[in-house]
Image: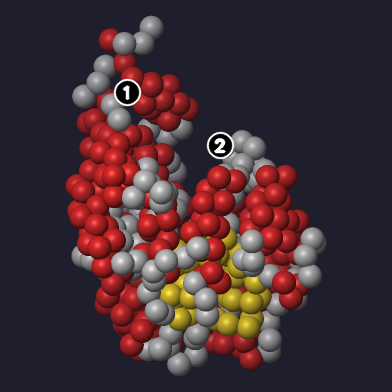
């Protein structure tokens, strides 16, 4: 397998015509991005039943399935684990996904986001047995699961299911490689131990790695002005032997072109570059107030429907780039138009579903203190 073939198009964050409505995908721009991606020799698309409220699958059908021969592309989709209520739901969701995509088989099919609570749902509904049957019947060429939890749970899952699966999709990036909560390195090594392929999600940690303080951007520029920050992160993941696919979610053509160039002219990380990234990880970890990847799983579980990732994003911006417009956005848009961060009841329901293992109630309290107690909007705004 060549390094070039490792570049996958993640379809969780597609371009939108309305930034506030994830179902409003910019189909025209996505079509052009798909054409560029395919023309450069790449062909792997990763989606989910949940992405863009189900519209991600429809957008892939329009941009890929209806415009290219079936043998020229690969599609990965995922079972919505959190929505399972019975064994019959497995077939119901699979049929719906096939219909949305306009295909009759998946190249790869995953049990989505295996963590402590959703693993229980998947096992109660015999979902692992169901995807094994999918592979036996040719409905899925390869099967596995995506994983957002610690190495201890992964070891238990692999001890039970490694013999029937082909792939584990992991959150893996140089910021989380040695993180004691995410444990990317330990999780990767467990997959290697079981002889499984690893597909990588969140190589940029939901944008945290590239949306870094100016000081860190300057460090990268001084180290190598000819390579983007994103390219280092993608190469970190793709340089690992058992990594077969590295996903990148792209909603801008310039990002796609940069990523195509990274894999077209791929260079494995040198020892010097690895040492540099270790230093950058330490700096970045110290600079990020809340390491949220904006996956949105917490919102699904929050009884108050607080837009948690949006608050954390503004909080991070206020720490690294203090500016009045950030505070104005908090008061005039989020806290006024949506559920205020102060509505958190500390129920803790969100904690098991956070892919980054953030103490969400505690951090929301800090958000409130930062914006509502630490700043008076009436002092600056009319």
Depth check, mark 1 against mark 2: the one in front is: 1
On the picture, is 92 further left or further right than 166? right
Label 2 sits on residue = 20
Task: Indicate whether 307 appears above or below 369.
Answer: below
* Label 1: which secondary element: loop
x then y, percent, for residue 148: 38, 66
x then y, percent, for residue 141: 63, 83
Residue located 68% across and 86% down the image: 138
Query: Which residue occupies the extreme top position in the image?
Result: 382
On the picture, is 210 further left or further right than 56? left
x then y, percent, for residue 55: 66, 53
- State which quarter of the image contains the C terminus: top left
Residue located 55% across and 58% down the image: 260
**Which mark sits nearer the N-terminus, 1 or 2?**
2
Looking at the picture, tell me which residue is in the foreground, 338 or 102.
Answer: 102
Q: Residues within 10 Å of mark 2 (few under 14, many from 20)?
A: few
* Label 2: which secondary element: loop
On the picture, is 129 further left or further right than 181? right
x then y, percent, for residue 50: 57, 58
| Mark carried by residue 115 | none
Q: Residues within 10 Å of mark 1 (few under 14, many from 20)?
A: few
Which picture quadrant has residue 316? top left
* Residue 146 in view (yes/no): no
Label 1 sits on residue = 323
Number of marks present in the image shown: 2
Looking at the picture, tell me which residue is in the foreground, 318 or 95.
Answer: 318
Residue located 34% across and 50% down the image: 224
* Residue 329 in view (yes/no): yes
Task: Indicate whether 280 appears above or below 367.
Answer: below
Task: Indicate whether 346 appears above or below 69.
Answer: above
Alpha carbon separation for disc pair 1 and 2: 22 Å
């Amino acid at each position: 397998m060549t390094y070039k073939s490792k570049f996958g198009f993640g379809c969780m964050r597609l371009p939108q015509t309305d930034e506030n409505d994830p179902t409003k995908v910019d189909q025209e721009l996505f079509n052009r991005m798909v054409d560029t991606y395919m023309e450069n020799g790449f062909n792997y698309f990763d989606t989910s039943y949940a992405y863009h409220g189900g519209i991600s699958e429809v957008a892939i059908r329009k941009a890929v399935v209806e415009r290219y021969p079936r043998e020229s592309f690969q599609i990965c989709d995922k079972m919505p684990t959190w929505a399972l209520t019975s064994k019959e739901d497995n077939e119901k969701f699979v049929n719906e996904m096939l219909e949305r995509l306009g295909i009759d088989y998946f190249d790869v099919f995953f049990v989505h986001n295996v963590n402590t609570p959703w693993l229980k749902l998947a096992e109660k509904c015999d979902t692992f047995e169901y995807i094994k049957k999918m592979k036996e019947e040719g409905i899925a060429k390869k099967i596995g699961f995506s994983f957002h939890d610690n190495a201890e749970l992964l070891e238990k899952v692999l001890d039970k299911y490694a013999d029937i699966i082909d792939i584990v999709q992991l959150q893996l990036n140089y910021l989380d490689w040695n993180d004691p909560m995410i444990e990317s390195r330990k999780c990767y090594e467990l997959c290697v131990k079981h002889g499984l392929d690893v597909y990588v999600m969140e190589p940029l940690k939901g944008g945290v790695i590239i949306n870094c303080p100016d000081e860190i951007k300057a460090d990268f520029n001084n180290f190598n002005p000819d390579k983007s920050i994103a390219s280092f992160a993608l190469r970190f993941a793709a340089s690992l032997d058992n990594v077969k696919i590295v996903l990148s979610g792209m909603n801008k053509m310039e990002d796609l072109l940069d990523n195509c160039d990274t894999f077209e002219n791929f260079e494995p990380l040198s020892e010097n570059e690895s040492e540099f990234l270790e230093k950058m990880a330490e700096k970045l970890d110290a600079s990020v107030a809340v390491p949220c990847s904006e996956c949105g799983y917490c919102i699904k579980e929050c009884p108050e429907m607080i837009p948690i990732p949006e608050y954390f994003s503004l909080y991070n911006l206020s720490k690294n780039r203090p500016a009045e417009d950030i505070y104005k956005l908090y008061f005039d848009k989020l806290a006024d138009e949506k559920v205020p961060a102060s509505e958190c009841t500390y129920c803790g329901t969100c904690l098991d579903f956070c892919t980054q293992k953030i103490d969400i109630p505690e951090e929301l309290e800090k958000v409130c203190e930062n914006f509502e107690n630490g700043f008076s909007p009436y002092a600056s705004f009319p």
